[in-house]
Image (cartoon, rainbow, N blue to C red):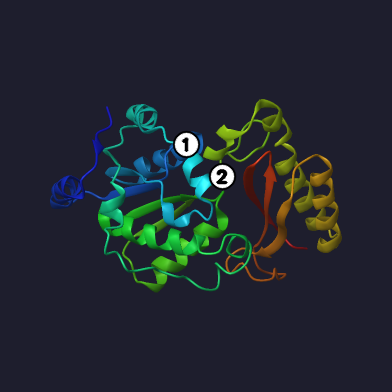
């Protein structure tokens, strides 16, 4: 059974023993409501580290919408049961006051990669992400941290954060995990009614089709305009953004550099995001 650890002092006691034994520590940061995408990160961490900590903290500072925060699924004991067969060493579930004490006054802001896309539509979101990731990396003293490529912009933020602050953790990216119909796995998918869940498959289908057309040499602007219209015609919308960006800087895409096609759209009150790689001709 995976041990659920709450006080930081208890976690630090375990970490001291692991470090004294020369063991490496991997961390998988989550907000719970675990699915196969999270479990793929855990398996990668188990393959690369002696000890694995999964953190579960629904971070209030990265939510722009109080209702979204309130509705976010909280399934701690089910999450612990999912982790048990994987041999996770600790499920760290800190109290909010331990992460953000009443006198907490520090906010970390990463510029550049956070400006477009999510940064435009969710002001302050990435400040909350950067701050909590730095806190969790410090709390766990992780040697490696595992993040999914589904949240592509977040991954670039975390890479920039660790590089700029000279944090010792290695950031390990892991492939996006998809359902059989192509939808990227997300905890928020649990909030989709069956009919909406069936329609959601149109999002990755449109994304992959648009990427293929761009790689075949069609003009990106026209392809994306048609894809946006097609999604909204299928009841997926509003489409907040559907953009071709540089895969590392999130600036304008350029030939000769890795590119990424990223989308965010609403479906029956649930916000879906996704991305795919694009090889520019």
Image coordinates for residue 140, horizontal then vertical, percent? 27, 53
Residue shown at 80% from the left, 52% from the top: 228
Dot label at residue 176: 2
Q: Horizontal placement of 274 versus 233: left or right?
A: left
Tell me: residue 57, above or below residue 245.
Answer: above
In terms of depth relative to the viewer, which is nearer, 247 or 215?
A: 247
Q: Residues within 10 Å of mark 2 (few under 14, many from 20)?
A: many
Image coordinates for residue 129, horizontal then vertical, percent? 44, 58
The secondary structure type at the circle numbered 2 is: loop
The secondary structure type at the circle numbered 1 is: loop
Residue shown at 67% from the left, 31% from the top: 197
Image coordinates for residue 191, horizontal then vertical, percent? 58, 34
Image coordinates for residue 178, horizontal then vertical, percent? 60, 37
In terms of depth relative to the viewer, which is nearer, 268 or 53?
A: 268
Residue shown at 78% from the left, 57% from the top: 215
Dot label at residue 73: 1
* Image quarter (top left, top right, bottom left or bottom right) of the N terminus: top left
Residue shown at 73% from the left, 52% from the top: 239
In terms of depth relative to the viewer, which is nearer, 23 or 178?
A: 178
């Amino acid at each position: 059974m995976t041990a659920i650890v709450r006080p930081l002092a208890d976690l630090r006691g375990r970490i001291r023993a692991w470090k004294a034994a020369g063991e490496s520590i991997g961390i998988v940061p989550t907000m719970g409501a675990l699915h196969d995408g999270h479990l793929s990160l855990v398996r990668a961490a188990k393959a690369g580290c002696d000890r694995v900590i999964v953190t579960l903290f629904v971070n209030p500072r990265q939510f722009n919408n109080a209702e979204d925060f309130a509705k976010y699924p909280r399934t701690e004991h089910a999450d612990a049961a999912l982790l048990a067969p994987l041999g996770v060493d600790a499920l760290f579930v800190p109290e909010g006051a331990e992460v953000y004490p009443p006198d907490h006054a520090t906010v970390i802001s990463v510029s550049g990669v956070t400006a477009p896309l999510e940064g435009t539509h969710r002001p302050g979101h990435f400040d909350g992400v950067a701050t909590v990731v730095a806190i969790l990396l410090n709390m766990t003293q992780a040697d490696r941290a595992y993040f999914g490529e589904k949240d592509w912009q977040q991954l670039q933020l975390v890479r920039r954060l660790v590089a700029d602050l000279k944090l010792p953790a290695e950031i390990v990216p892991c492939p996006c995990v998809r359902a059989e119909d192509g939808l990227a796995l997300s905890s928020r998918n649990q909030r989709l009614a069956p009919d909406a869940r069936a329609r959601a498959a149109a999002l990755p289908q449109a994304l992959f089709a648009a990427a293929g057309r761009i790689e075949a040499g069609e003009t990106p602007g026209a392809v994306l305009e048609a894809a946006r219209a097609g999604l909204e015609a299928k009841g997926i919308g509003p489409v907040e953004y559907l953009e071709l960006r540089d895969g590392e800087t999130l600036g304008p895409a350029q030939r000769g550099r890795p590119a990424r096609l990223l989308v965010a759209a609403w479906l029956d009150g649930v916000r879906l995001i996704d991305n795919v790689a694009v090889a520019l001709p």
